[in-house]
Amino acid sequence: MLSNNIRVGVEINLADLPSDPRLRKSISDYDSNIRDQVQREYLQSPCQPKDHKCLKTPCGAKERRFITDWFIDFPNWLEYSIEKDAAFCLCCYLFKTNSRGQAGGDVFTKNGYRNWKKKRRLYTHVGDLNNAHNQALKKCEYLMNERQHVRNSIQKNAKPSRTSYQIRLTASVDCRRFLLRQGLAFRGHDESNNSSNQGNFLELLQFLADHDEQVRAVALHNAPENLKMTSSMIQKDIVNAAAVETINAIIADMDNALFSILVDEARDVSEAIDALLCKHGLSTSSLRGQGFDGAISFGGCNKKHDIVGAFFTLVAKVVNIVGASSKRRDILREKQALKVIQALKGGELSSGRGLNQEIEIKRSADTRWSSHYGTLINFTAMFSSIIDVLDEIAFDKLSQALQRDDQDIVNAMDLVKLYLQLQELNNRFNETNTELLLRLACLSLNHSFSSFNKERLMLLAQFYLTDFSTSDLLVLESQLDIYIDDMQSNSKFEDLHGVFDLAQKLVETRKHMTYPFVYRLITLALILLVATATVERAFSAMNIIKNQMRNRMGDQWLNDSLTVYLEKDVFSVIDNESIIQRFQNMAPRRGQL
């Protein structure tokens, strides 16, 4: 989002403002024409990483740390810098006076406060009514209260009707919501009054005015020239407000839960990730998985199990190869049917209604664990048949290449290498990899939790040393016995489809509180990253958003548009009031509500 001042032409990308107090430059270094916009941005998103696990540092005779519960006691001004491990005052940073004796001088604005032993020092910083901190706090409140803003006071006699402004603004938001959801361009090549096509936004607003008398009375030609709410800057501010509210809704829904992240590029992004997490109050201590353009890593896991990432990548490749054509799928189906018949004859499988149904390997639809779970279960059941099909594919390709002319000899030799690699595929799926797959399969709901295996689930829990202590593992072992008996005898847990449904049903029946450690294990399974398809879909969506009509979109404008387009389900439940209030607080507005 860019601020704009016609007289001086000052511009700033508010999205690039550093969130961590340690990394901010002095507020006085910003141009006076944009300073209030910077202040508003910080006031709406104070740096309060509430779920961050602060490290203990020497403080007197003991080791102490910052307590995140202090944010509850001082919600309006207290900030914490992960970069410096220090506390800061947002209000004093934004409106610091020259009274060095008050409010702790530079301690809460530049140096940071780190004496965790003395919480009372925070109350001393607040002081009495005339203290510099409270004066700064009042200025923050005045800034966010547009009715008391000096510019609005000057324009008091020139304000249009509040009701008319609200109708006009709401109509603009409605039109932009529709265009955002459809990924359509807003502006037109010719938006003049004589144009036969003024662009999607103006044409849609005109359509709305034609069918709504209230809108027609206050919009477009009937609106004040300086308050039409149709300019590109107003457009970007409204879309940014919508994007921020969408992200805030997602963060609120997470409720300090564990999470994973997906990144398209793995190089030089650590600082960007840290800044992003800090901006949204998220902590790396809750991070359990990172996906970098196809390479998956798992936070919180024992380092000796890094093979997990390579395993999931290999599964995706095998699925793509085996399912590349109907012929290969038919071969796989035939081989699997023969193996099932042999197993039935040998007594390895039981026969009966609903058992041994035909299954097939399938590509996962998206990155949610619930959608990949079926792929992994079928992959386990059909593993030996898959190896047979891969062997046939490699042999056929090798034979075809060797029968071609000499110019294909290089390709033929490459295929020889591929064939040798496929011969060792069982080695790539070694005991550790196969055991991991089997442990995950123990969460399967199929056939009344018939795949449940307590020992393997206990081994799966041991991957997450930061989530299960030694005592937690003992409790988990006990809970698993009671859990599986409950699940198999409870009719409410019948006809569920995947681990995601299981987790939802556990919450609905409040059994997630009865089996907290089992639920934790299921949660960790749900956030496992299997692929980075979400990132790839974001790039596909970018081709829709940034088309020929919008090929000059800036990064922030594109990011905001993509956020609401990709998160349509979340965006749909955000009401206009939330977007309008954020829009009003972003900068001084001529129109008031």
Image: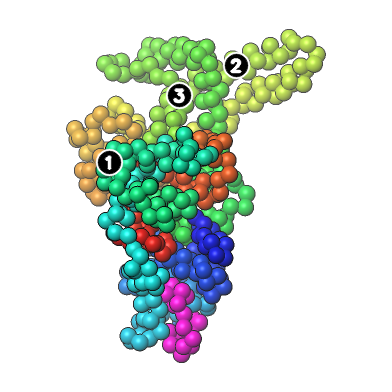
Residue type at numbered disc 2: Ile
Q: Which residue is mark 3?
A: 362
| Nearer mark to the viewer, of 3 and 2 | 3
| Nearer mark to the viewer, of 3 and 1 | 1
User: Which residue appears at 48% of the width and 12% of the height?
Assistant: 330
Q: Nearer the viewer, residue 225 or 581?
A: 225
Query: Residue 591's x, y, as percent?
Result: 36, 60
Q: Nearer the viewer, residue 111 or 456?
A: 111
Query: Residue 517's x, y, as percent?
Result: 32, 49
Q: Which residue is mark 1?
A: 212
Q: Which residue is mark 2?
A: 393
Is the Cβ of the residue at disc 2 closer than 8 Å to that at disc 1? no
Q: Nearer the viewer, residue 202 or 281?
A: 202
User: Which residue appears at 40% of the width and 29% of the height?
Assistant: 374
Q: Point out the stretch of residues depicted in magenta.
A: 89-108
Residue type at numbered disc 1: Asp
Secondary structure beneath label 1: loop
Secondary structure beneath label 2: helix
Q: Label 2: how many residues lie within 10 Å, few (<14), some (14-19) or many (20+)? A: some
Residue 102 highlighted magenta (yes or no):
yes
Secondary structure beneath label 3: loop
**Position of the C terminus by quadrant:** bottom left
Spatial distance from mark 3 to mark 2, Cα to Cα?
Answer: 18 Å
